[in-house]
Image: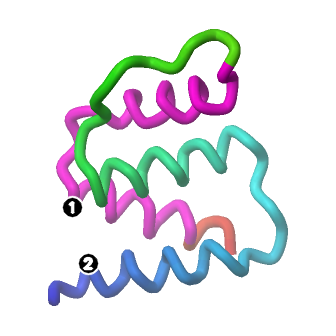
């Protein structure tokens, strides 16, 4: 297991016990980087106007499109570290 993967797994665990809840934009960024790191580029149709949460998540994930898994993992780790 690479050290980046270990750091990523530790950051995922740490994200559940941050001292305070991040704002919505930061939460979307955390979500997008996690999804990009674990599942790759977003696929499927963008949720409709009535599903505002799903649409925001989709748009955030789409914003990370093209990043490699390692790149997304590193950004995720850095973001979680900055929130501690």
Q: x, y (%) of residue 42?
A: 31, 34
Question: Measured along the vertical axis of the image, is residue 30 above or below residue 63?
Answer: below
Q: Quadrant of the C terminus?
A: bottom right
Q: Residue 28 lies in magenta, yes or no?
A: no
Residue at left offset 57%, top offset 13%: 48
Residue at left offset 25%, top offset 55%: 71
Q: Return the residue nearer the eye: 11 or 48.
A: 48
Image marks 2 and 1: residues in contact by CB distance under 8 Å: yes
Numbered circle sitting on residue 70: 1
The segment highlighted magenta reads: 51-80
Q: Return the residue nearer the eye: 53 or 22.
A: 53
Q: Residues within 10 Å of mark 1 (few under 14, many from 20)?
A: some
Numbered circle sitting on residue 20: none
Q: x, y (%) of residue 79?
A: 53, 61
Q: Name the chief secondary structure element in magenta.
A: helix
Number of numbered discs overlaid on the protein picture:
2
């Amino acid at each position: 297991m690479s050290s980046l993967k270990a750091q990523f797994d530790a950051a995922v665990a740490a994200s559940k016990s941050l001292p305070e809840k991040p704002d919505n934009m930061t939460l979307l960024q955390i979500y997008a980087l996690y999804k990009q790191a674990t599942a790759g580029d977003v696929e499927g149709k963008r949720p409709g106007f009535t599903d505002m949460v799903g649409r925001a998540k989709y748009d955030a994930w789409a914003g990370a499109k093209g990043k490699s898994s390692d790149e997304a993992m590193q950004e995720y780790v850095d973001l979680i570290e900055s929130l501690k």
